[in-house]
Image (cartoon, helix red, strand yellow):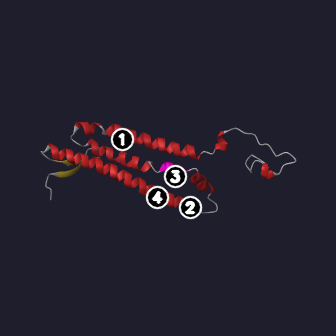
Amino acid sequence: MFGNLIRIDTGPDGSHQLFVHTDSLAVAIVLVALLLVTIVLASVVCYYLTRALMLWVVGRLARGEHRKWVRAAERRRVFHKLAPIVPALIIYLAAPLLASLTFPAIAMLATPMAVAAACFMVYAGLRAGLRSWPASRTATTTCRLPASGRSRASCRWPRSCCT
């Protein structure tokens, strides 16, 4: 249909490259802008879709009797912090597409964009992981049983410690 105007080639390293042949600078700028807008829109849509789906699944899993860790992670909003990994992954995977463009300024942005997306994915994973870490495990405490005149309900330490 388009002849040789639009083609996708596979490079020697197995990466796919998109080629659009045009003689007009204005058309090329519009195509690059459209590509960038498409990447951003796909990231935003996937963020909200992933967040809604993940929170629905976690809510269903947290109803189970033997899934205390899911309820604890849900209370600490761990899964809210994991949702931004999906848009970062989309940007990371779209970086080679930008590298194949013939505009040098846009093609040079591909590697830093991929590195920034990978760093953000690590940061989001660490932020979610550290958020799930219980505060009682980070502080070194010793167990003190309640005094003889107090009940076990007034013990300020975790119930497993005061039994």
Which labelled disc corresponds to residue 114? Answer: 1
Judge whether residue 163 can be spotted in this image: no
What's under tag 3, amino acid-wise? Phe
| Magenta stretch bounds | 77-82
Distance between mark 3 and mark 2 Cα atoms? 12 Å
Residue 118 visible in the displayed image: yes
Magenta-colored segment: predominant secondary structure: helix
Of mark 2 and mark 1, the one earlier in the sequence is 2
> Which label was assigned to residue 52?
4
In the rendered image, residue 32 lying in the magenta stretch gets the answer no
- CB-based contact (under 8 Å), mark 4 and mark 3: no
Which residue in the protein does label 2 denote? Answer: 61
Callout 4 secondary element: helix
Residue drawn at 41 percent across, 53 percent down: 47
Give the distance between the C-alpha atoms of the residues marked 3 and 1, in whole angstroms: 23 Å
- Closer to the eye: label 1 or 4: 4
Q: Which residue is mark 3?
A: 79
Q: Residues within 10 Å of mark 2 (few under 14, many from 20)?
A: some
Q: Indicate the position of residue 92 as horizontal and vertical percent values.
A: 37, 45
**Residue 116 placement (x, y as % from top left):** 39, 39
Could you tell me which secondary element the residue under label 1 belongs to?
A: helix
Q: Residue at x 50, y 57 (%)?
A: 55
